[in-house]
Image (spheres, rainbow, N blue to C red):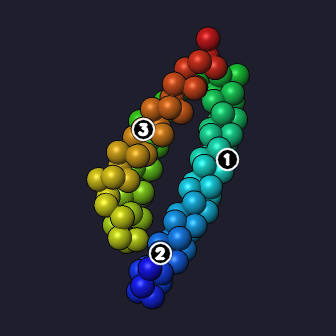
């Protein structure tokens, strides 16, 4: 293996190690987010509040699209991701209301 290939392999490993750490951060952050939304869902169920809040959802999507744009992340991807997360949260809230 040439020196250039060895350096490339080492650099690739560093990138992959970084990606693995970031994946862990994402998973633990999502877990914490869902713990918070579960608490919200329980509160809504206890007080007979609707499981979704379209105004809040719209505001959150706009806020995250703006943050995505500012950070260089595709806002369309951010919107799709947040819509997925919101739909899961609403599904959990609906289950708590049964």
Query: Which of marks 2 and 1 precedes in the sequence?
Result: 2
Marks 2/3 in contact by CB < 8 Å: the verdict is no
Image quadrant containing the N terminus = bottom left
Marks 1/3 in contact by CB < 8 Å: the verdict is no
Please tell me whether residue 62 is drawn above or below residue 69 in the rendered image: above
Is disc 2 placed on a helix, strand or loop? helix
Identify the mark at residue 21; answer none if there is no mark. Answer: none
Query: Which of marks 3 and 2 precedes in the sequence?
Result: 2
In the drawing, does residue 79 fall left or right of residue 12? left
Is disc 3 placed on a helix, strand or loop? helix
Please identify the quarter of the rendering in which residue 17 is found.
bottom right
At which x and y percent is residue 56?
46, 43
Image quadrant containing the C terminus = top right
Residue under the point 69% across and 27% down? 42
Q: Is residue 30 shown to the viewer in this render?
A: yes
Please give the residue where the numbered disc 3 appears in the rendered image. 84
Marks 1/2 in contact by CB < 8 Å: the verdict is no
Please give the residue where the numbered disc 1 appears in the rendered image. 32
How many C-alpha atoms fall within 10 Å of the one at disc 3: few (<14), some, or many (≥20)? few
């Amino acid at each position: 293996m040439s020196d250039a290939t060895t350096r490339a392999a080492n650099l690739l490993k560093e990138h992959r190690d970084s990606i693995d750490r970031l994946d862990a951060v994402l998973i633990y952050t999502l877990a914490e987010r869902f713990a918070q939304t579960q608490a919200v869902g329980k509160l809504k169920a206890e007080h007979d509040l609707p499981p979704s809040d379209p105004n809040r959802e719209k505001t959150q999507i706009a806020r995250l699209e703006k943050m995505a744009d500012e950070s260089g992340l595709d806002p369309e991807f951010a919107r799709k991701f947040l819509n997925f997360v919101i739909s899961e949260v609403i599904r959990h809230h609906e289950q708590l209301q049964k």
